[in-house]
Image: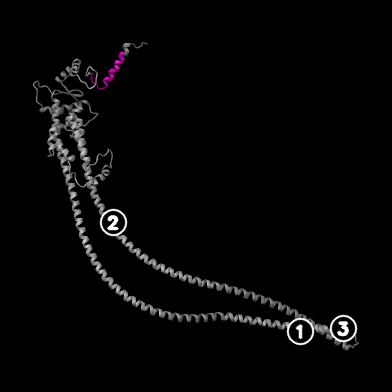
Amino acid sequence: ISSQTVWTKFKTQLLSLMENISSTRTRYIRCVKPNQKKQPKIMEPLSTVEQLRCAGVVAAVTISRAAFPNRLPHHVVLEKFSSLVKGSQKIEYHKDENKSDDEYKKDVIVVLSTLFANFPAKEDNSKEFVCGKTKVYFKAGALEFLEQERMNAMAHRIIVIQRYFRGYIERSKYVSLRSITIKVQAKARCTMYRRRYRTFRMAAIVCQSFVRTFIAKNELLRLKREWSATMLSNWWRTAKAVESFKLHRKAAILIQSLARKAIQRPIFLSELAEARENTKLENQLLALQRKLEKAEERRLEAEKKAEDARNAAPVVVSAPATEQVNSQVAQNTELNAQQQALMDESGKMLEYLRKEVFKLRSQNAHLRQDYDTLKANNQKMIETNASAGASFAALNNHAKHLGKSNQKLMADLSAQKNLVSNLTLEQVELKEELKMKQATYIAEVHSRLQYQRTLNHIVDIIQLRCRDDRLVDDVLALSDDCEADYMNGPTGMDVRAPAGSTSGVSDMFKSLSSVTNSSPSKGITQRFFSFFGGGEDVEQEESQTKFSGFQTFAGGFSEAD
């Protein structure tokens, strides 16, 4: 195994360096010292030129100028000069990464051959350009000729763009002026008709007041006559009502007395029959008691006599006398048994009668309690009926009051409906007017946006393709001054909407809504016209003398762009 030597390492690193250089776009860089003091912002021309001469830079530039000093890639040539070719040989350039170098080379040869057909021929009859594999090499003066032709074509196109732009601006001014004139006319007519309406309304009000006064007087007289008649009829009706009330009251009292008599008569008759039965029972009880007392007295006398007879001395009596005494004793015994049975029966009868009397008395007490309860309920019902009548009268009055309130509310509702309809009509008119204003303002916003985009586009193209730095700085300063003048003016606003924003017009509508008159001062449009040579002010001549070369190089508005 052989190890790497210093030579093999150097060779490997050199090959790697060459591969990296071949894969990139190389540039020759030469460091030049501006001065020997090594201080900033000091330039010594003699020392600098000597360094360039010693380094061979001056000789290389001289040799390059003698042969092909200018060189451009194929796609750059097509991008810049393909738009100058006209007719059937015109080529539309579109950048395509898949397109080969040979195809680009053929298109470049066709374009440059057509363009250099009018170029003045030289003594040696050599071509003004040579096409390489990736670049085109131009002789001295050839590229300047192409640039001059391109500037002339772009100047012509710029004039066409200016013509359309100025026409658009003037047309926008005319539309705005016409809309403002229509608004002024509408306002004047509105004022005139409003005054006429007020006059007619005052006259109508005066006529209505006279008519209403006449009608009100007649109504007052009629009400007075009706009031007098109403009072007389009220007095007459009151007298008749009082008399009728008295008669009806007497009749009601009589009917009540007869009704109460008819109601109480059966009750009285039943109570009278019951009283008679009670009296009859009491008389029977008294008669039975008397009979019992008499029977008791007899029994006591008989017992007393029998006892006296036993206690008397025995007397010899005969048989007939003994039989007589025994019969008499048997009669007394039988009489005592009858009296005892009668007394038992009368006791049972008395006990039964006592029970019946107790039952009747208890029923009578219950009936009296029921009567008292019914009487109290009747009194309560009378009081409830009286309170219900009072409540009904109060509810009737409340219903009348509610009816009046309902009528009043219906009248207010109709008035509110009329007011709402009038407000709706006014709202519709205001919406229509607002739509007209919004359309006008949106059109103005779009014109402002288009104008600013065009100005920014022009400034960007000048920055990209202009070689005069002073002219670029002057154009940028003029653009900033125009923008500042417009923003400081009465109609100034920032119309630069961010990319992708869709609410720019609606956000700027508020700033445009207060604009009714154009600014008397010089705005950005006049400054732009004076810069492009379209105005008639004194500044136009100054801008033409200061920027005489603008129209020759501002060819950014090509068809490819």
Q: Point out the tag, 2 or 1, that comes first from the N-terminus.
A: 1
Give the x, y percent position of residue 336: 79, 82
Q: Residues within 10 Å of mark 1 (few under 14, many from 20)?
A: few
What residue would you read off at disc 2? 424
Give the x, y percent position of residue 377: 54, 72
* Location of residue 140 with respect to 295 vertically, above or below: above
Quarter of the image with the C terminus is top left
- Secondary structure at badge 1 equals helix
Cα separation between marks 2 and 1: 121 Å
| Image mark for residue 294 | 1
The span picked out in magenta is 10-31
For the question of whether residue 237 can be seen, the reply is yes
| Amino acid marked by disc 2 | Thr
Which residue is nearer to you in this view: 543 or 281? 543
Q: Point out the tag, 1 or 3, that comes first from the N-terminus.
A: 1
| Amino acid marked by disc 3 | Arg
Cα separation between marks 3 and 2: 141 Å
Q: Residues within 10 Å of mark 2 (few under 14, many from 20)?
A: few
- Secondary structure at badge 2 equals helix
Residue visible at 26% across and 69% down? 213
Which residue is nearer to you in this view: 82 or 297? 297
Which residue is nearer to you in this view: 321 or 167? 167
What residue would you read off at disc 3? 310
Give the x, y percent position of residue 268: 59, 81
Give the x, y percent position of residue 248: 46, 80
